[in-house]
Amino acid sequence: MSNQEVIKPTAGTERIAAMDITRGIALFGILLMNIVGFGLYKAYFDPTNNGGATGWNLNVWWMNNLFFEGTMRGMFSMLFGAGILIFTARSLEKKGATVTDLFFRRLLWMVLFGIVHCYLFLWSGDILYCYGLVGMFAFSFRHLVPKHLIIGTTVLLLTTTAWGISDYYNAKKYYETSMVANQKKSRGETLNKEETKAIEQWEGKVKEFKATPEQLQDEISAKTKGYWSIAMYSIPGNQLVQTFFIYRYNFLDTLAMMLMGMAFFKMHILKAARSNRFYWFMALIGYGIGITVNYYETLHIVSNNFSILSIYQSWWTYDVGRVATTCGHIAMIMLFIKSGWLSFLQKSLAAVGQMAFTNYIMHTIICNYIFLGYGLSMFGKLQRYELYYIVAGIWVFQLIISPIWLKYFLFGPLEWLWRSLTYWKIQPLRRTEKPAVIPTLVPETQTAVN
């Protein structure tokens, strides 16, 4: 029997239910943030562009920035990093090369899925492509001890922070120089090359962050046409997201959180295996730092009427706030899991997490049908708070359908396809016997670690 025939996908009884539940919650949280990109134009950071910036619309933006911005994505990246350890830990020494081959094949398929998701399923906010690329780098760090993984995370996040500070000062320079240059221009004076460049650069920033009424209508018009028209229109933006945006923003961010996830997995934090005291302390520190930082960032942006420079300046402390808040979320989720409360909800969330790939793509299919022209053409037409009626509907639907599907099938349909492609062999899909009840904790996590 060959090595590839011996090494098989993770069976349901081998899964860590605490991580499945956390993954389900993170997936729902990602939709909470992504829905703005699905339904509104340039409104993610600046609600004045589309969807409303007063009343409940502003309240929703505030709540997202305080509690969810960057945290759900960060949690999902951490779980992906932990998943690398789980996948590779199943190898014996003599099968190491085979498992490595399987792992990289698995990620190469993820890269391809990401391209399809972006260009054919029409979601420029795809994370699969990024995870496939970054996962190949994260793989090399899997043997590091938690201390070194945390150091690596810190160095990467400090690098992104330094880069963000540099961006702020560059933008500030362009703004100030362009203001002076425009005054000279209005007086009929000749501008030098630096002043001309500053005007061009600042106008580019304004075009990137701010939407004019004409731009909004043009975007709505483009997004409410037929499928192929939208696909062609989206290509330049998709190319930018899967090239420059990954290089500038997503790569270091994602790698840092994957390393942090590896560290937390090795420290048994993600298995709900630490003591309640540990998790309460983690939540207190995480929320105490994170929500405080997030509050002052959000207040600064609102107080400056969502100016471009205030948004740039908020990134100085962005990683401090969102990483600390992410830790608070993880701690509270682990306490929820350990409590055993709402066991029916925990089981449904675990099922959502087991089918995360399928459910993630389902978000795109449902939302694009609602918002784009080949469906209901609702893009740009709803208030910001109204988007969350759609989010709640999708959450309820997936909480119901996921456990029903897993009652009859071993994997979600896309999880099954991914596994079959990874192992170059059609995997079984239908259950041949009644599935085991999803436990709140797997046996090895029952003992608390102080």
Image (cartoon, helix red, strand yellow):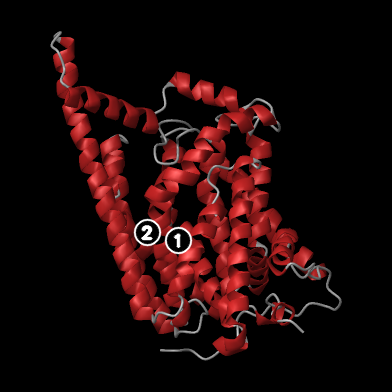
* Residue that lies at the very extreme toward the right in this rendered image: 432
**Neighbours of disc 1 within 10 Å: few (<14), some (14-19), many (20+):** many
Is any part of residue 137 visible from this angle? yes
Identify the secondary structure beneath mark 1: helix
**Image depth: mark 1 or mark 2 in front:** 1
**In this image, 148 relative to 234: left or right?**
left
Label 1 close to label 2 by CB (< 8 Å): yes
Residue 68 position by quadrant: bottom left
In this view, the residue in front, 435 or 250, is 250
Q: Quadrant of the C terminus?
A: bottom left
- Dot 2, how many residues are within 10 Å of its Cα: few (below 14), some (14-19), or many (20+)? many
Q: Earlier in the sequence, mark 1 or mark 2?
A: 1
Instruction: Give the side of residue 183 with respect to residue 340, left or right.
Output: left
| Residue type marked 2 | Arg
Picture quarter containing residue 436?
bottom right
Tell me the CA gap for discs 1 and 2. 8 Å
As drawn, the residue found furthest toward the top would be 188
Q: Is residue 15 above or below residue 218?
A: below
Q: Which residue shows up at 22% across the image and 22% down it? A: 196
Q: Dot 1 corresponds to which residue?
A: 74
Residue 382 visible somewhere in the drawing: no
Residue 207 x %, y %? 37, 28
The residue at the point 75 percent across, 60 percent down is 413
Residue 55 position within the rendered picture, expressed as x and y whole percent measured from the top left: 43, 37
Residue on which the image places disc 2:
322
| Amino acid beneath label 1 | Gly
Q: Position of residue 287 (x, y in %)?
A: 35, 65
